[in-house]
Image (cartoon, rainbow, N blue to C red):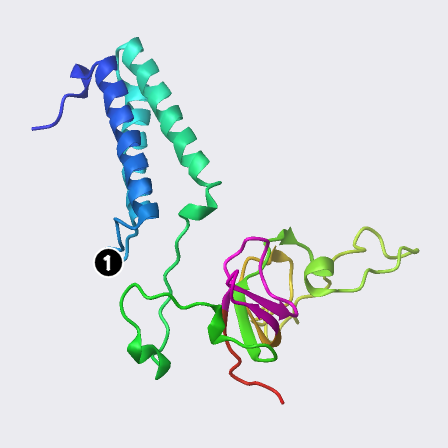
Amino acid sequence: MLFDYTKITADDVTTIAGRAIDEAEALVAAALSGERTWEGTMSPLNEMAAAMTIAGGRSAFLGRAHPDDAVREAATAADERMQKFASELDFRSDLYEAVKEYAGTDEAEGLEVGAEVKCDIFEAGQKVDAIGMTKGMGTAGVIKRHNFAVKRRTHGTHENHRHGGAIGAGAYPGKVIKGMKMSGRMGNERVTTRNLEVVRVDTEKNLVLIRGAVPGHNNGLVRIRPALTAKA
């Protein structure tokens, strides 16, 4: 039997939305205090986001489909309240979590579940690789993306000063070769910068100071590992 959504009242919508936000706040607090741990592949925060998405979708549906004006207004207000709560979480850097799997080593045999691995595993002068997502530049042309030369702005050039030019032959091979340098999305890709030098290790603040081009934007997530092809 299908649920008759027309029997829902405005008070029901407000109560359901308030309960969803209260449960989300409790889940966030539990995640920060360590009471909630990872369950499978879904973190407590992802679980909270999924529940909020479902609740927000229901409110948005009621705001469009319910015949009662009061219920539609309450559903719209509830959806806006949940969206505001979700947007405020985006600015809470202490809520983000990341899980990464590493190959086992001899040093990792003595580790127990919940143990902390800090920056003292690195040392000054060591060569490391930095892995991260580069800054997203959006859609860029061949001049900015691939350092193509700008054509001369003289007679005969017309309106293609920043164009890429020809992208292939005619009859043979009759196609665009894979890997052709063209305009498109620039940045926002996984990059590994190899053989960077560790300048200093601050064990008190748990910081690793690295000299070189570490990929990513400010406050980005960077993975550091011992250099695979360390140079002398």
Three-letter amino acid code at the position of disc 1 = Gly
Q: Quadrant of the C terminus?
A: bottom right
Residue 117 found in image quarter: bottom left
Which residues are drawn in magenta?
199-223
Magenta region includes residue 153? no
**Residue extending farthest front:** 204
Residue 23 position (above or below residue 108):
above
Decide if residue 43 is on the left or right side of residue 219: left
Residue 191 found in image quarter: bottom right
Residue 226 position (above or below residue 35):
below
Looking at the image, which is closer to me, 102 or 67? 102
Magenta region includes residue 218? yes
Please tell me how many numbered marks the rendered image carries. Answer: 1
Decide if residue 113 is on the left or right side of residue 77: left
Asked if residue 209 can be seen in this view, the reply is yes
Asked if residue 190 can be seen in this view, the reply is no
Q: Residue at x 24, y 24 (%)?
A: 16
**Residue extending farthest top:** 69
Q: Residue at x 51, y 67 (%)?
A: 203
Q: Residue at x 59, y 77 (%)?
A: 124
Q: Quadrant of the N terminus?
A: top left
Residue 167 position (above or below residue 98):
below
Q: What residue did someone put label 1 on?
A: 40
How would you classify the magenta stretch by its main secondary structure?
loop
**Residue extending farthest left:** 1
Percent coordinates x, y for residue 43 in the rendering: 30, 52
Percent coordinates x, y for residue 179 in the rendering: 58, 70
Percent coordinates x, y for residue 204 in the rendering: 52, 63
Decide if residue 75 is on the left or right side of residue 213: left
